[in-house]
Amino acid sequence: MAAEARIIDGKAAAAALRAEIASEVSGIKAARGLVPGLHVVLVGEDPASRVYVASKEKQAVEVGMNSVAHRLPPETSEAELLAKVAQLNADDSVDGILVQLPLPAHIDADRIIDAIDPAKDVDGFHLSNVGKLAAGRAALVPCTPLGSMILLRQTLGSLAGLEAVVIGRSAIVGKPMAQLLLQADCTVTLAHSRTRDLPAVVRRADIVIAAVGRPRMVKGDWIKPGATVIDVGINRLPDGKLAGDVDFAEAVKVAGAITPVPGGVGPMTIACLLKNTLTAFHARRG
Ligand code: GUN
């Protein structure tokens, strides 16, 4: 019987990344007197969104950035939100703009994302960044896939030639993840809810990325022995506990390495938001 999988410590990796970012921010301050600025916009009172935004705001402060959260009332109109985005686009001290999703139903999220200056789009959601990523050009890349790639490279080194199966085709995770794995020379399968015999498809994978939002859907006997498993799911169970998209207790006995939930990909997402803010700062301000 093989030993249990190595647990990929996303919390430690995120702390190390934030320390690097903090050191770079302090270097920029000392050399140029500039402070990278991250502006997060929240409309309404969604409790989960409030927690995420507070966490983004706090972590940006901790790495020394100019961190501003704009909390707008739930009745904010689309025109008012567009005006806020235009104001942040025009402000040279603003390097990164993130509009927290979901937005209230009376606001068209696509119209808001389209209005963000692509050079400040630290979510990587603007069509310009989506297109650049697909074309293999330098782009701002969505934070969760970016964080997952960092964990994969730290775990495996080169990914060239490996079979990667991504489960879930969302615009925020699945599709950009598949693009990044392809850029890293993996052979990529993008599986989804209509995929036939998903367990058999997943069993081919050296790398499994689970991003479906269904608790413990990926079973241990779907995993090829020794495979690396990245679990993007964060699902709240009826008892209040968190579970990933992978049945961790089963998969840990088969995989070579696996991310836990919580403490895997989650902490990397906000660290990568800060990384994207620095990338945007450098691209825009030299
Ligand atoms: N809501 C949940 N995840 C995200 C994210 O990555 N970006 C934004 N803007 N909103 C979200």
Image (tube, rainbow, N blue to C red):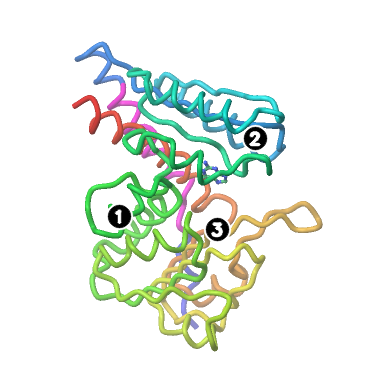
> From the Cβ of disc 3, is ligand 1 less than 8 Å away?
no
Front one among 198 and 154: 198
| Residue at 32%, 65% in the rendered image | 181
Give the quarter of the image for residue 224.
bottom left
Residue type, label 2:
Val
Give the mark toward the camera: 3 or 2: 2
Give the quarter of the image for residue 197.
bottom right
Q: Which residues are magenta?
A: 8-25
Give the mark toward the camera: 1 or 3: 1
Using residue 239 as the reference point, say whether residue 118 is left or right of it. left
Specify whether residue 53 is painted magenta. no
Helix, strand or loop at mark 1? helix
Helix, strand or loop at mark 3? loop
Local crowd size for mark 3, using a 10 Å CA cut-off: few (<14), some (14–19), many (≥20):
many
Residue 12 x, y percent position in the rendering: 44, 44
Residue ID for mark 1 = 133
Ligand 1, by image quadrant, is: top right
Query: Disc 1 and disc 2: Cα gap in Å?
Result: 29 Å
Residue ID for mark 3 = 260
Residue 81 x, y percent position in the rendering: 56, 29
| Residue at 32%, 55% in the rendered image | 154
Tell me: residue 70, above or below residue 229: above
Using residue 209 as the reference point, say whether residue 105 is left or right of it. right
Specify whether residue 22 is painted magenta. yes
| Residue at 51%, 24% in the rendered image | 84
Q: Main secondary structure of the magenta part?
A: helix
Sequence order check, earlier mark of 1 and 3: 1
Local crowd size for mark 1, using a 10 Å CA cut-off: few (<14), some (14–19), many (≥20):
many
